[in-house]
Amino acid sequence: MRNKWVIIICFLVGYPFLLFAQNSKQNLLDSGKTAIQVDSLNKLAFNRKSVNVLDALNILSQAKDFAEKINYHKGLTNAYYTEAGIFQQNGFNKRAHLLYEIALDNSLKYDDTVLIPKINIQIAAYQVLEGKVDEAIKLYNQSMASCIKLGQITEVANIKNSLGLIEIKKQNYAKAEALFKEALQLSQDTKFVYGQKKSYHNLGLLASAKKDIATARLNFNNSISFDSALNDYYGMSLNQLQLAKLLLAEHKLNDAIVLAKKSYDNARKTNAYSLMTNAMVFIKDIYKSEYDLENTINWQDSLINTLKLKADNEVDYANNFIALVKDKEIQKLNTKKEIEKANKRVSSQVIIIIGGTFLLLILAMMVIFAFISYRKQMLLSRRLYKQNAIIEENAASLDNLNKEINSKNLLLEEDNRTKDKLLSIISHDLRNPITNTQTILSLINKGALSPEESKVLLEQLETQYINTTGLLDNLLGWLKSQITGKELEKSDMNIYDLMNGMHLEQKIPLMHKRIKFINITHNDTVVKAEKDMIKIIFRNLISNAIKFTPLDGRIEITNREDELYHYVMIRDSGIGMSEEVLSKVNAQKYFTRTGTLQEKGSGFGLILCRDLLQKQGGNLLIDSAKGEGSVFTVQLPKAV
């Protein structure tokens, strides 16, 4: 009997430890699988960075999260290294430098001798950009010594090419030539194609600096042969532009232009805006020197369009990067919180296992001794009752906390709606004035107008500027009322005067499309409304009517009233809306169409009008048929 109880006690005591050992073994297996997954994600991100940068950054974010969870330092370092390269190739050098420093710190912490020199090479390149040439040379030489020791010959070739470019800037041509030739020999020995084409290109730059045109041409052509084999359009464009400069130095202007145009075409294939710009400036300057006015103007216009496109893309790209970086920081913070929670859960599990073991031991002893006494049972019952009371109290606290969180979420959703409304107003109501301003300035800059016409347009531009500034002030006032949560301050507004003001605001687009604006509202009709909001509503509706009314059309404003409401009708002779389009508009869905002269809209105008009217107890009614124009009726309640 005694042996039987000994076996039971041993089982009860040992079982939790057996469970813990099995869980530890499973965790080790899971960590191994996660490390493989991290390496795969890093490789996938490296391959995706030339196709979709944002996709690659998202993949790297996942890799870092997994690596941090299992403390996989090599995978984490590789993720930071690849991420830094993406930011560097897209012009975000400071961000790239910060990420390289993080990767270096992580490598030094774990003495990762393979990655340290590779990271130092990139940091040295950044030091060159910062003008810290001596520090960069020192770091390049340290990295080269490490790469030689590790047998990383391709990295040695890259370092020698970088050092050679520094020597060209210092006009140490003999030393630069020696470095480029050493890099070329190493690249040839290891069949490192990128190193060969880079070495030939750099030797061409060196020969150009020394005014040795024949040698420069030979080296640039050698580099192009590698670019062609690799379908490297960027490299071909770079070499072709250098060859065009050599032809210009030989006064072979026509040949230089032909080659520069090829450089431009290849740069355009890779959306390399800087190279495209350099090629166009080169071509334009040659035509200008030959007094070829027509070609000069054409290439100058193309250059302006390309620079504008580049600026727009850079703004969009930067915004996307900023948004992505913010998202990543939030994800990183959430991941850290999850890791902390997981660590606490693991610690709790260990404590529970140990506590459970002792509890089982006590229970076993109590079974062996038949629970000793009834008094101890009563004591245990009282303790259990107290614990249940604590649990119920905690449950009630948790319920209150959930209610508070839900309340906060509702406030956040309201803030998001306010932000969306503001963005829609700005995009819809400020676009037209800015577009008109651009058109007027373009006509004046190109000299397409007489002095008298320019004067008239500039006067219109001044009026439009004042109106746009007023609109911006109104928007800021409206935003302030949304943020502070103030009640609407309504005032009396004369409909006839308001429509005349709208006529003046829209004078330029009305003249552009030769549309008649007819205000036949009663000059004594007064409505009570929030002044800024009502202007925004009618500005959107009249702008919308102009957009979908063809040339020589008409827009007519009338009004009426009944016992409860004032009605203001905006009737146009435009293209109208089909039943399908009308159903989308009435359903408050985001929807946009191009106007009769291909005008573009934001798609938020009518949604915004309805929302602002609802805030004032009003409504927007729409009556339209395809090909028969539209009638937009603003319904406002009479003052009580």
Image (spheres, rainbow, N blue to C red):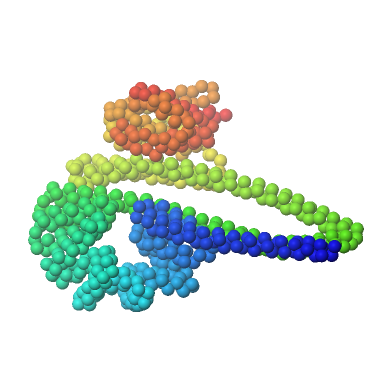
Quarter of the image where the C terminus is located:
top right
* The one of 270 and 291 positioned closer to us in this rendering: 270
Q: Is residue 2 above or below residue 635?
A: below
Could you tell me residue 628's position as x and y percent? 35, 22
* The one of 522 and 75 positioned closer to us in this rendering: 75
Quarter of the image where the N terminus is located:
bottom right
Q: Is residue 565 left or right of residue 290?
A: right
Q: State which quadrant residue 91 falls in.
A: bottom left
Is residue 234 at all visible to an observer of this figure? no
Q: State which quadrant residue 324 falls in.
A: bottom left
Could you tell me residue 469's position as x and y percent? 38, 45
Q: State which quadrant residue 107 falls in.
A: bottom left
* The one of 562 and 493 positioned closer to us in this rendering: 562
Q: Is residue 197 left or right of residue 289?
A: right
Determine the residue positioned at 33% across, 29% down.
549
Could you tell me residue 389's position as x and y percent? 79, 53
Q: Is residue 581 left or right of residue 4?
A: left
Determine the residue positioned at 35% across, 58% down.
90
Is residue 350 at all visible to an observer of this figure? yes
Determine the residue positioned at 76% across, 50% down.
392
Could you tell me residue 44's position as x and y percent? 41, 56
Determine the residue positioned at 24% across, 66% down.
196
Number of marks in the image? Answer: 0
